[in-house]
Image: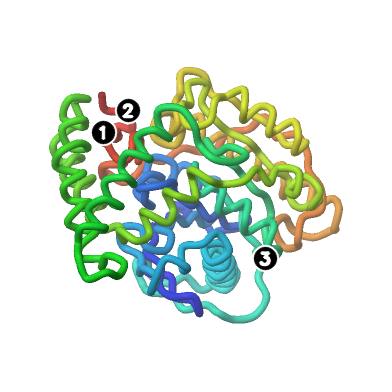
C-alpha cells in the first residue's frame, strides 16, 4: 500500500486483526539504516491480532518510498516532519476505517481532521528519527518505543563498516568529474559495487538463502544513494538528546533491545532507559534486530506495553484507550497477543549494512 501525505508518498505494509475491528490505538513502525518495512513482517500480524492496525513504512528514500530532491531532505528535522505526516495519516485512517474498512492494498490519502495518535516504534536509525519526531512536538503519540536504538551515534564495528562504505561513496563521487556533487546515477553505480564486492559475498558466507539475498540486493539498489550518505553520516554524528527527551514529559517510553546488540551496547541502552525513566526490556539471546530474531517475544512485549499505555490513558482521561494524548506511563501488563502466522514472505533485517537477513521462519540466517 501507499500512504499519501502533504510530505509525499511512502510505501507501507499493513496488518489488521484477522477477525473483529481495530478497537485499539494504531501502531507505526520505522526501520533502520538500509532497512525497510519488510524487517517487521514477522511481527506485523501478531501485533495486529491484539485488535489494532499496524503499519510499517519505508522512510524517505528507503527502498520503495520517494526520495528527497537533495541531501537536506534527509536531515533529522525533515525526517521527523515526514513521520508526523505519516502518523497523522495512519491515525486518521484508523479512526475512520474502524467502521468503514477499505480493502488492504488501496492507496490512502488522509491529511484531514484530528487524530487519535499512534504507538510509534523506531528501530535503530528509526529510533533516532522517532526521538526527533517526539522532540519536534508535531507527532501525536500514545507511546514511544526505541527498539535497538541508542542515545546518539553508533560505535564499534558497525561504525567502522559504515565509515568504510561512506568513504567509498565519497571517493567515487569525487572522481565522477564535472566539479559538482555526484549525481544519484553516479552514486548508484558505487552502491552497486559495494553490494557486489562486499555485502553480497558476506551474505553468502553467512549462509543467507538465495531468495533473501535477491531481495536484499533489490532493496539496497532501491535506496536513494544520497539518502544513504545523509542518513549514514547522521548515524555517525548523531548527538545525545536523551536529556531533552527526558525533560519533555511526553508519552510513556519503552527501551527494547537484545542482549547481544552490537550497534549500541546493551549497557548504553540500559543507561539511556534509566535517564529517560523509561520501561526497559532486554531480550536474551537476541542481537540488533529483535523483530527478526525474536518476533514472538518482541510482539508480546510491545502488545503488553501498548495495552498498559492505553489503560493508563483511559484512567487518566476517562476515555476509551487511545483516543487522547498520553500524559503518563505505567508498568506493562503481563499479557500476550493472540498470535497469527506472519505473511509467507522473507523478512530480512538490515543487519551489517544489509548482509544479515531472516529466513521466512523468522530465524536469522547465518
| Whole-number angstrom distance, CA of label 3 to CA of label 2 | 35 Å
SS class, disc 1: loop
Instruction: Report crowding for label 2: few under 14, some 14 to 19, many 20 or more residues within 10 A (C-alpha).
Output: some
Query: Coloring scheme of the render?
Result: rainbow
Q: Residue at x 21, y 32 (%)?
A: 203
* Residue at image mark 1: 359
Label 1 crowding class (10 Å Cα cut-off): few <14, some 14-19, many 20+?
many
Q: Position of residue 260 (x, y in %)?
A: 48, 21
Q: Is residue 228 left or right of residue 117?
A: left
Identify which residue is drawn at 50% across, 51% down.
29
The earlier-in-sequence mark between 3 and 1 is 3
**Relative to 243, residue 284 above or below:** above
Residue 31 image point, x, y percent:
44, 49
Residue 206 appearing in the image: yes
The tag earlier along the polypeptide, 3 or 2, is 3
Report how many numbered discs are placed on residues in the image: 3
Q: Nearer the viewer, residue 40 or 207?
A: 207
Task: Check disc 3 and report its element: helix, strand or loop.
Answer: loop
- The image quadrant that residue 194 belongs to is top left
Q: Which residue is mark 2?
A: 363
Q: CA distance from mark 2 to mark 1?
A: 6 Å
Residue at horizontal 54 percent and vertical 63 percent from the top: 83
* Contact, mark 2 vs mark 1 (Cβ under 8 Å): yes
Name the disc covering residue 116, or none: 3
The nearer-to-camera label among 3 and 1 is: 1
Q: Secondary structure at mark 2?
A: loop
Q: Are marks 3 and 1 in contact (CB under 8 Å)?
A: no
Is residue 299 something that shows in the picture?
no
Amino acid at each position: 500500500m501507499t500512504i499519501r501525505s502533504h510530505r509525499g508518498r511512502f510505501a507501507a505494509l499493513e496488518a489488521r486483526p484477522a477477525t473483529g475491528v481495530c478497537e485499539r490505538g494504531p501502531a507505526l513502525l520505522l526501520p533502520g539504516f538500509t532497512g525497510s518495512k519488510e524487517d517487521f513482517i514477522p511481527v506485523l500480524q501478531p501485533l495486529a491480532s491484539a485488535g489494532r492496525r499496524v503499519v510499517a513504512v519505508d522512510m524517505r528514500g528507503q527502498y520503495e518510498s520517494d526520495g528527497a530532491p537533495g541531501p537536506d531532505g534527509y536531515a533529522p528535522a525533515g525526517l521527523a516532519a515526514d513521520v508526523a505526516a505519516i502518523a497523522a495519516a495512519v491515525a486518521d485512517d484508523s479512526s475512520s476505517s474502524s467502521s468503514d474498512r477499505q480493502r488492504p492494498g488501496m492507496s490512502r490519502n488522509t491529511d484531514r481532521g484530528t487524530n487519535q495518535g499512534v504507538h510509534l516504534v523506531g528501530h535503530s536509525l528509526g529510533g533516532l528519527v522517532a526521538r526527533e519526531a517526539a522532540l519536534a512536538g508535531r507527532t501525536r503519540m500514545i507511546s514511544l518505543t526505541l527498539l535497538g536504538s541508542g542515545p546518539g551515534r553508533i560505535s564499534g564495528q558497525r561504525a567502522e563498516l559504515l565509515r568504510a562504505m561512506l568513504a567509498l561513496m565519497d571517493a567515487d563521487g569525487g572522481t565522477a568529474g564535472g566539479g559538482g556533487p555526484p549525481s544519484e546515477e553516479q552514486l548508484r553505480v558505487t552502491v552497486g559495487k559495494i553490494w557486489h564486492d562486499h555485502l553480497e559475498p558476506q551474505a553468502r558466507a553467512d549462509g543467507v538463502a538465495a531468495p533473501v539475498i535477491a531481495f536484499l540486493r533489490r532493496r539496497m539498489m532501491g535506496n536513494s544513494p544520497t539518502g544513504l550518505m545523509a542518513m549514514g553520516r547522521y548515524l555517525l554524528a548523531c548527538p545525545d538528546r536523551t536529556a531533552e527527551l527526558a525533560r519533555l514529559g511526553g508519552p510513556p517510553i519503552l527501551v527494547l533491545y537484545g542482549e547481544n546488540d552490537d550497534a549500541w551496547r546493551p549497557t548504553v541502552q540500559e543507561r539511556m532507559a534509566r535517564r529517560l525513566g523509561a520501561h526497559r526490556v532486554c531480550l536474551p539471546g537476541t542481537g540488533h534486530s529483535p523483530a527478526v530474531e525474536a518476533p514472538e517475544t518482541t510482539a508480546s512485549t510491545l502488545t503488553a506495553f501498548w495495552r498498559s499505555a492505553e489503560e493508563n490513558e483511559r484512567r487518566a482521561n476517562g476515555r476509551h484507550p487511545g483516543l487522547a494524548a498520553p500524559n503518563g506511563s505505567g508498568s506493562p501488563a503481563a499479557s500476550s497477543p493472540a498470535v497469527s502466522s506472519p505473511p509467507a514472505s522473507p523478512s530480512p533485517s538490515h543487519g551489517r549494512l544489509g548482509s544479515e537477513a531472516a529466513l521466512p521462519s523468522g530465524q536469522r540466517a547465518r
